[in-house]
Image (spheres, rainbow, N blue to C red):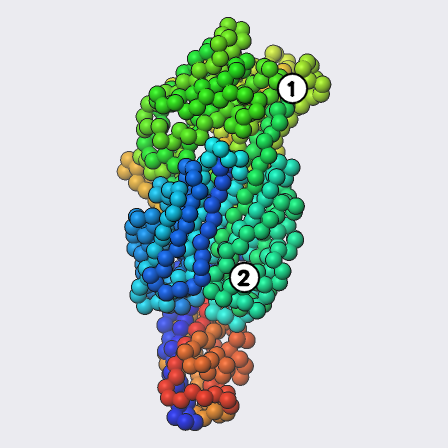
Amino acid sequence: MVMNKINLQTFLSCIVVAVLASLAVQPALADYNFEGVPYTDELAGVTQGTVRGGVYVDGGHGIGSSPYTQSFTVPGGTVKWARLYVGVWGGSEEKSGSIAVAFNGENLGTLELEGKNDTNPNVYCSGHGVYWIFYDVTDITTSGPIDSVVTTGGDFDGRVYGIVLVAVYDDPDAEEVEYRISDGNPNLHGLGLVADEPVENNESYAYFSGIDPDRASAARLTVAYLCGSPYENDYLYFNDDKLNGDDVASSTGYFDLLTFDVTDILEESSEAKFDRGDEFYVHPVLAVLTLDIEAVDWNIDGVPLQTIKQGNVNGGIYVGGGHGKEYTTSYTQNFTVPNGTVKWARLYVSAKDTPWINASLNGHFLGNYTKLTDNPKVYANYKPDQSMYWTYYDNVEDFIVNGNNTATADLGTNAGNNTKSWGISLLVVYEGGDNPENIEYWVNEGNPLLHGDHSPFDAYQNTTSTSFAAITNLDSVNNATLWTAYIWGSEESEGVPNDSLWFNSNLIAEDSSDGAGTDDQGNIWRGGCFDLEKWDVTSSLATDNVVLLDRGGDDLLCPVGAILVLKHISEPTAENGIVQLHATILPTVSLEVTPDSLYFGTLAPGRKSDEQELILSSKSSHSIVVTADVTDTAGDLFVDGLLLDSESWSAYSQELAKGTSVNANVVLGVPVDYTGVGIQEGSLIFWTGAE
């Protein structure tokens, strides 16, 4: 898309007006989009997961001048993830400025905000310079009172809409909470505004998938808006149910932060729909869905695999473990973690026939779990008094080191033919490292037990499935890997159908759980009843993905983890002298307009200027469509009075074939009731795009 801008000037005595127009041509950059960033009609999911604690969302207080201060009070607990958001009004996408942010006594640095030319990776800029900026503040968010101060400067407006803190925190005394967090900056607007195309942008969505409504005792949706106005109706729907009447974004401060109870209308795949209504502009920028999860009662068939964490990282994922079944009361596993900064991690321990699980990592005590069939961090199945357990510890991040790590699980007192473990596994999401990559990941866990109808079961349980939904950037994915983990699987006898693994109805593997143990050095041995494997699913990847696991002839099959890792194309990097090159080629879009200025002479209210002529010449590689827009600082003189080819500029549309030209006749009509005098200025802008 290319924009051609003409600056307009006019002179008015008591009854006189004059206009000057100049033209410049430059391409629009991909990072800024008038219609919305990163998507025009959708907020992007940035993280989701489950925490024994809660999600804190607070902020606001409406538009105000710099410096702008907002106070927060974060609940007690350990912060696992946190983002600070700042909304800034630039006044125009043509102007630039700067922002400096302090949070909890730390300086987060200064950013240059460049409007339509902005390329900051943590800045969503859309519309006429509406900024929604985010900062990762996980490591500096603490419980208790916190202040944040924003200071802006430069040529743009620089007022602050509001500051919002979203913090996911762990509290061992709290209940389990599922969360899904989405953000962005779609610009919802009507016709006749400066845009790449003269169209409306009326709706935007936030999608939330993989929900079990039966487990949620309560569900809340929190949303934030910029630029909403009172007395201009807009609407919010959750699964087609209207929330908050006919004017949701109605603050006089152009900032709204609202929370709604959506417990009774929750669905497995839920969506929030932001409808512009008759708002001139409104920007939905944040959607947070939280679910209070009821404790799962013990079930002979276990707990289905479900998404507990989703996110993005510029670094890598380490998945390690093994080494197979041991009858023991002390089980040890070694891990070799790559270089990088740990962002999120879990240690998993499997066990059977034990009254407790006591774990440590690198000599640091992680916790002693008792009452294993009634512990929210322990998945149990098979028999109440002889359950197969898959338990997790999510307090391991501070104890992981780059290189060698050792985990130990102490289990009960009954060795021999009773107490046993199939293995310990470690999952680490890290940033940076030796070869960082742009990675998106989903972590699904549980312990569904597949079996026949023999004792202690009274029915077959042959298959189970889990999903990874709402993947939006398929075109940028150059590799997709699925990790699977089993704590009970076996090598079938000859002639017995193998268990199988399917991804989007494509067979990925037969005998995917063959009972082979795998140690940290890659040595494999059979009979271990533990499997940790990775599979390439790049060619089968879709927007919504389903993993199906079939036990085949296995007597018992217990999958406990499914992890999807997507590698996205990123900036080329050099490794061993080789540079991987990637490029997206767009068609040439170019328009030349002459002359570069227009002078309409001296005019009075109610009078029209003489006709002026512009020549529009296509320099594009293919056919283009040209539309027009007008802005001014003259009380809408040019917005209301400029005509192109005898019609309002807002109706102008012209198709130009490659290498052709067309004349556009321009007239200024001064409204009868116009009261301005002296020199008045404005801009005529031509937008060009592919046909």
Q: Is residue 19 in sight in this rendering?
A: yes
Residue farthest toward the top in the current orientation of the protein? 416
The label on residue 285 is: none
User: What element does badge 1 sit on?
Assistant: strand
The label on residue 451 is: 1
x then y, percent, for residue 292: 57, 39
Cα distance, mark 2 to mark 1?
Answer: 53 Å
Instruction: Please state which amino acid type lies under the numbered disc 1.
Output: His
x then y, percent, for residue 24: 36, 72
Residue with the mark numbered 2: 249
Residue farthest toward the left in the current orientation of the protein? 577
User: What element does badge 2 sit on?
Assistant: loop
x then y, percent, for residue 397: 38, 31
Instruction: Please state which amino acid type lies under the numbered disc 2.
Output: Ala
Q: Quick one: label 1, few (<14), some, or many (20+) residues within 10 Å? A: many
Rendering quarter of residue 157: bottom left
Q: Is residue 109 above or below residue 174?
A: below
Q: Quick one: label 2, few (<14), some, or many (20+) residues within 10 Å? A: many
Identify which residue is drawn at 57% across, 22% down: 373
Identify which residue is drawn at 57% across, 57% down: 274
**Counting residues from the N terminus, which is met first, the one under dot 2 or under dot 1?**
2
Q: Nearer the viewer, residue 168 or 548?
A: 168
Q: Is residue 655 in sight in this rendering?
A: no
Identify which residue is drawn at 37% across, 43% down: 141
